[in-house]
Image: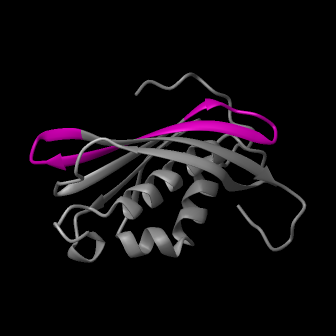
Amino acid sequence: MSTPLFEPRAVNFVDRVRDSFARQGAMQTLGASLGSVTPGAVDIEFPWAPGLTQQNGFLHAGMVATALDSACGYAGFTLMASDAAVLTIEFKINLLAPAKGELFRMEGRVLKPGRTITVCEGRAFAIEGSQEKLVATMGCTLMAVTGRDNIQG
């Protein structure tokens, strides 16, 4: 998925994303790691694990949604001001195929950044050997949150 060229508002945006990601228990539960982090684009990867599946052995839709939400959230976060935190305010997911694979890659991409509201899209890929299959897409709306001591980036 191509990404338009965006200018980050925080010079240390990569460190901010990595620090925030390291604090996220949900991504630790998935065994996820950050891949590419560029202005307006973040990739997250994690391996298949039995504890993440539904009854047929496919990655559970909730796990797909969780990881896509984080990929989109961090994509938007790359463009937010240094005093902002990010929260998702809406998403819609389309499950296109069973999430069957050895590895999963979630791509979050900013479509339209804003000072307060950012719109992103995500794509989930199941990888089996050298084959990649698109298994889900997401539309995601984010909010930049500032001035709240209990919410951090």
**Residue in the picture at 18% in, 54% down:** 100
In the picture, the quarter occupied by the C terminus is: bottom right
Residue 143, how many percent across, how many down?
A: 74, 48
User: Residue most toward the left?
Assistant: 129
Residue 77, how many percent across, how many down?
A: 65, 48
What secondary structure characterizes most of the magenta part? strand
Return the residue nearer the eye: 120 or 62: 62
Q: Is residue 83 left or right of residue 108?
A: right
**Residue in the picture at 46% in, 60% down:** 66
User: Residue most toward the right?
Assistant: 147
Asked which colour scheme the image uses, the reply is one colour
**Residue in the picture at 60% in, 64% down:** 20
Q: Is residue 128 magenta?
A: yes
Please state the total of marks drawn on the protein image.
0
Q: Is residue 55 left or right of residue 78?
A: left
Q: Quadrant of residue 101?
A: bottom left
**Residue in the picture at 77% in, 68% down:** 151
Determine whether 24 is above or below 117 in the image: below
Return the residue nearer the eye: 96 or 117: 96
Q: Is residue 25 left or right of residue 147?
A: left
Residue 92, how many percent across, how many down?
A: 52, 45
Q: Quadrant of residue 115?
A: top right
Determine whether 124 is above or below 27 in the image: above
Residue 132, how many percent across, how many down?
A: 19, 39
Q: Is residue 112 magenta?
A: yes
Determine whether 139 is above or below 147 in the image: above
Determine whether 149 is above or below 35 in the image: below
Q: Quadrant of residue 52?
A: bottom left
In the picture, the quarter occupied by the N terminus is: top left
Q: Which residues are magenta?
A: 110-133
